[in-house]
Image (spheres, helix red, strand yellow):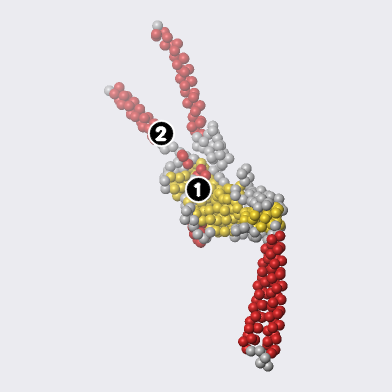
């Protein structure tokens, strides 16, 4: 009777022990620790990485405006010239002869006008005594007026001849850098058409021509109307060009033109900026990449790159709420600034945005928030390899006991082995 009772008690004890072990196994693990930053609204520059093409500030074609034989090129190709500087010489002999002919025509017209005026004055003095008829007086006065008009016509022809003679010296219309000679000496120029001789480009400043999609430009203007976007402090948008070697050009440019129409072929709007080029490092025709500061974004947030996730619905971040649980927030980003995303919508001031440990948490589950330290470990806010994570001290303390257990078992086995050998025999 006693033996069954002992067996029953032993069975109950074993069952209680197994139940206690299961409860320990079913205990939930501690919430994962994540690195977070506090979302703080800021006024940040709205910047875009764009590509544009350089063009001269002014470009003038130097052409032969009168017919003649090109005698000489006066300037050096590729050199800087001043406005009004002589670049080419055209044979002036035919033009000078035309000027002399115009002068002779003017002298003849002036002599005819003087004779006509004298005849008209004589007729007007005799008319009161009826010594000349009314028709003769009218004819004399008409001849006088015609002679005066002929003088004016001859004067205009003389002025035109002087202008054409001046065109024999082809001058630069603007200051800038003169290009390659297009016509050699001895060629007949200006015969039937206006011959291109060379081109002069003004290289300081330069234009940066680029384009933006109409959707992006419309969104920017809508944000500006709502007060979410404002111009920079001086009221102008600026551009900062990057050179081919990766360095930043030391002269910032200023946006000065925005087209009012959309290119139907590309769906983009043309824009232009003025870029100083005092040392003439940049040359027209080259493509350049630049950072355009198009205004200031109000109530924006900077979020590290690794904190922003994307899926089929768009960009989102995970935050630790006031209840200690992870929540998702869909956000709207306005582009990258350095190692951060500029977020313009979806966040609230004070949100604890998860930066490190995003892969360890799930939406709706608890998480332990700690300030994110970019310098810790590998730069993602996690502890270095081999360091004990927070809350792991008890487990670390239990390791020596676990390690000692095999040693005790081994010693017990070694002690028991000799005693077992006589039995084997």
Q: Give the residue at mark 2.
A: 24
**Horizontal placement of 394 versus 56: left or right?**
left
Image quarter hosting the C terminus: top left
Q: Is residue 346 shown to the viewer in this render?
A: yes
- Looking at the rendered structure, the secondary structure element under dot 2 is helix
Task: Give x and y (percent) for residue 344.
Answer: 50, 53
Q: Give the residue displayed 64% in from the left and 51% down from the top.
A: 182
Q: Is residue 36 left or right of residue 73?
A: left
Depth check: give the residue in front, 337 or 68. 68
The residues bearing labels 2 and 1 have C-alpha atoms spaced at a distance of 32 Å
In the rendered image, the residue lying farthest to the left is 1
Say which of 125 and 267 sits in front.
125
- Quarter of the figure with residue 69: bottom right
Name the spot of residue 224 as percent of width and height, x first: 52, 59
Q: Looking at the image, which residue is at 36% across and 32% down?
A: 19
**Residue 135 rendering spot, x and y as whole percentages:** 62, 87
**Residue occupying the point 53% across, 38% down:** 382
Residue placed at 70% from the left, 72% from the top?
106
Disc 1 designates what residue? Answer: 352
| 2 or 1: mark nearer the eye | 1
Give whichever of 308, 264 is nearer the camera.
Answer: 264
């Amino acid at each position: 009777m006693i033996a069954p009772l002992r067996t029953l008690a032993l069975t109950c004890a074993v069952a209680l022990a197994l139940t206690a072990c299961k409860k320990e196994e079913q205990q939930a693990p501690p919430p994962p620790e994540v690195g977070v930053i506090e979302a703080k609204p800021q006024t940040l520059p709205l910047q875009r990485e764009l590509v544009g093409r350089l063009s001269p500030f002014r470009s003038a074609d130097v052409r032969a405006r009168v017919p003649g034989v090109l005698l000489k090129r006066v300037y050096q190709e590729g050199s800087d010239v001043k406005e009004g500087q002589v670049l080419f010489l055209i044979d002036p002999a035919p033009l000078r002869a035309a000027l002399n002919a115009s002068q002779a025509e003017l002298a003849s017209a002036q002599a005819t006008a003087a004779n006509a005026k004298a005849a008209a004055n004589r007729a007007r003095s005799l008319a009161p005594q009826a010594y000349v008829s009314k028709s003769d007086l009218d004819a004399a006065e008409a001849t006088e007026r015609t002679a005066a008009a002929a003088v004016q016509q001859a004067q205009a022809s003389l002025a035109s001849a002087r202008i054409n003679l001046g065109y024999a010296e082809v001058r630069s219309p603007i200051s800038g850098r003169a290009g390659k000679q297009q016509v050699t000496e001895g060629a007949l120029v200006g015969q039937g058409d206006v011959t291109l001789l060379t081109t002069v480009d003004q290289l300081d400043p330069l234009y940066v021509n680029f384009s933006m999609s109409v959707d992006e430009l419309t969104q920017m203007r809508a944000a500006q109307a709502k007060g979410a976007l404002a111009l920079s402090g001086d009221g102008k948008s600026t551009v900062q060009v990057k050179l081919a070697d990766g360095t930043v050009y030391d002269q910032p440019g200023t946006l000065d033109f925005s087209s009012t129409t959309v290119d139907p072929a590309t769906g983009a709007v043309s824009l232009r900026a003025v870029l100083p080029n005092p040392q003439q490092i940049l040359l027209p025709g080259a493509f350049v990449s630049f950072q355009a500061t198009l205004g200031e974004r109000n109530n924006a947030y900077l979020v590290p790159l690794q904190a922003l996730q994307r899926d089929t619905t768009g960009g989102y971040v995970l935050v630790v709420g006031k209840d200690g649980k992870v929540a998702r927030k869909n956000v709207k980003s306005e582009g990258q600034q350095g190692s951060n995303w500029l977020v313009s919508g979806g966040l609230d001031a004070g949100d604890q945005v998860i930066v490190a440990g995003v892969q360890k948490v799930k939406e709706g589950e608890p998480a332990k928030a700690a300030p994110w330290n970019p310098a810790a470990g590998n730069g993602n806010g996690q502890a270095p390899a081999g360091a004990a994570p927070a809350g792991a001290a008890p487990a670390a303390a239990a390791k020596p006991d676990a390690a000692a257990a095999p040693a005790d078992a081994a010693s017990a086995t070694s002690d028991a082995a000799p005693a077992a050998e006589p039995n084997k025999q």
